[in-house]
Image: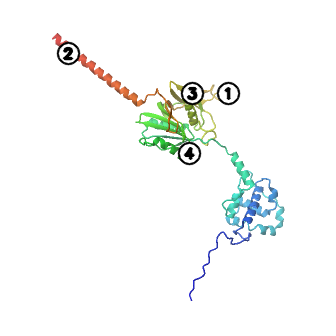
Amino acid sequence: SFSLPRFVPPRSPIQPMARDPREPGSFLTKKERKKMIDSLSAVIAADQGDGTTEAASAIPVSLAKKVVAVRRGIIGRQQSLSLVGDENQDSESDPSDDEEEQPTGSASTVVDASAIVAARLGKSTVSSSSSSSAAQATSSSSKPTYKRRRVLVLSSRGTSQRQRHFLNDVRALLPHSRKESKMDANSADKLVRLNELAELANCNRVVYLDAKKGRDLYLWLANAPHGPSVRFHVQNLHTMAELKLTGNALSGSRPLLLFAGGFEAQPHLTLIRHMLQQTFNPPSLHPRTKPFVDKVMSFFHLKGKIWVRHYQVVWGGSTTTEPETRLIEIGPRFVMTPMRILSGSFLGSSIYVNGDFVHPALMRRMARVDEAVESRDNARSRAAASRARSDAIKVSA
């Protein structure tokens, strides 16, 4: 009679295939794994000079030598797999190794013992030992920290050549900035989408240049994503390449910010000052900044406008060739007129509205109307003069 073979389920990989720790690549129980992790961690801690010689003294020195060799890359992966299996054999064959001095590694090298043991035993995560936690604490404390402040700098489409050069100058002034491609000027929700772009770029400040018809330029400063945001009208714009000034400061250095002209007199000016300070002041210890002070950015408030200038500081004294400290203008230079302050980032209620500001498009329209009225009056006066001359000729005739 024909019968099917008996189905034998496959052995689960979790079940140990071999319990002998001497066999290379064998599966270990949790107790054996923990014991091996503790012993190897103690060996590596002793090799690093952490003072744990008592915990490592109970381990054969041959095993310690192999651990140090694996750490320094002397033996390969196949020999590192047999690291556990040779422990008892080496301890029984050569008992005189226990009296040898354990090798010590370089003090500048920091190695995570748990990570090495996990790589040897095929386990992804293991509990950290005291030596590894101390090494991680030392490395984290020695790393310099700085306040993460990033500025997103971008413009709208339709900018002129001078406005594009001005955008590059602003990016050069902000070493902690990140640039983004131009936005579509015809989009209805372009200002709201700026918050999404800032979130994707991991930026908490936004500098947005909004060009209108290639003539007018508006500058937005915003704290994303909660606000506030300020809108300026930019006038009298001159770029670095256009001015060709002799100033030449170090790229990436942190500038001194100078505010003059009564920024503390009114609340909206105080808010504008804080926003300018947070935007144009690169954070300390930033990777892209230089530890030098050789330039000054000045903001002067005069007649309702903010005049911005950028100077190089030429230090004078006995150690330099300059007799005295002086300032040399670098550029760019521009004038900003505050228009409106919103409570949110590119949205929200209006906190401040400049009632004295006249829109440049309205000014151009008024100028065209005045020109048309003047030309009409001139035409009427010329027509009246010609009629008077013709009447005089008729009377004389």
Quick check: marks 2 and 4 in contact, CB under 8 Å? no
Q: Kindly report the distance in space between the C-alpha atoms of the residues bearing marks 2 and 3.
A: 66 Å
Residue at the (62%, 41%) spot, across then down: 147
Q: Kindly report the distance in space between the C-alpha atoms of the residues bearing marks 1 and 4.
A: 46 Å
Which residue is denoted by mark 2 in the rendering?
A: 390
Q: Position of residue 373 (x, y in %)?
A: 32, 23
| Residue type beneath disc 1 | Ser
Q: Quick check: 131 left or right of 2?
A: right
Q: Residues within 10 Å of mark 2 (few under 14, many from 20)?
A: few
Question: Of the numbered discs in the image, which one, if any, rests on residue 318?
Answer: 1
Q: Position of residue 310 (x, y in %)?
A: 55, 31
Q: Is residue 73 visible?
A: no
Q: Nearer the viewer, mark 3 or mark 1?
A: 3
Viewer-proximal residue, 98 or 273? 273
Q: Secondary structure at mark 2?
A: helix
Mark positioned earlier in the residue sequence (2 or 4): 4
| Residue type beneath disc 3 | Phe
| Residue type beneath disc 2 | Ser
Which residue is denoted by mark 3 in the rendering?
A: 263
Q: Nearer the viewer, mark 2 or mark 1?
A: 2
Q: Quick check: 275 left or right of 53?
A: left
